[in-house]
Image (spheres, helix red, strand yellow):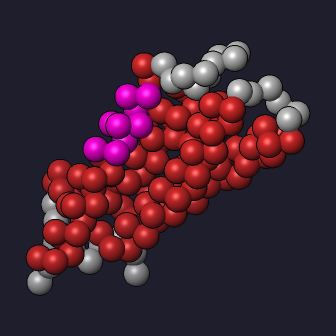
Amino acid sequence: MLSDESRVLAGILLLALVTVETGGMYMVKLVRGSAPATPFQLAFARAGHAHAGVLLILALLCQVLADSTEQAGLLDWLSRAGVAVAALLMPGGFFFSSMGAGRERPNGLIALVFAGAAVLAASLVSLGVGLLTAG
């Protein structure tokens, strides 16, 4: 059985995957040339879409694993929700830093990708250590 925390977050994550599916429809438009985009924007759209899907699936897996640790407080939060936060930050960085007609380079919002990577790393380290030290 899942803990209440994992059950609720897993439900939210599954619903969030519907937004990735919707983004896939936009990706089809980009690839077919039905929506205007520079090669840079197309590459960042692909990267954002891929990161969103993969990180949400990983966040679902983390729910089951977090229930197997004995963590509390910040470490429990990192283990349980950190990957989900990274699933917002990293794709957001790809999408928001490439917005704008004819953009060829990322704007300052590319920092979200790096912030997401830091949260992702902290989350995975927290969960890994939590699993290795669980009784």
Q: Is residue 130 left or right of residue 14?
A: left
Q: Is residue 112 in the magenta section? A: yes
Residue at position x 20%, y 61% in the image: 126
| Residue 11 drawn at (x, y percent) | 53, 60
Is 85 in front, or is 92? 92
Q: Is residue 59 left or right of residue 22?
A: left
Q: Is residue 75 left or right of residue 22?
A: left
Residue at position x 42%, y 19% in the image: 108
Which quadrant of the structure image shows residue 129? bottom left
Q: Main secondary structure of the magenta part?
A: helix
Q: Is residue 97 in the magenta section? A: no
| Residue 56 drawn at (x, y percent) | 50, 57
Segment tinted magenta in the rendering: 110-118
Residue at position x 16%, y 77% in the image: 132
Q: Is residue 7 left or right of residue 35?
A: left
Where, quadrant-wise, is the N terminus in this rendering? Answer: bottom left
Residue 119 versus residue 70 in the image, above or below: above
Residue 86 versus residue 108 in the image, above or below: below
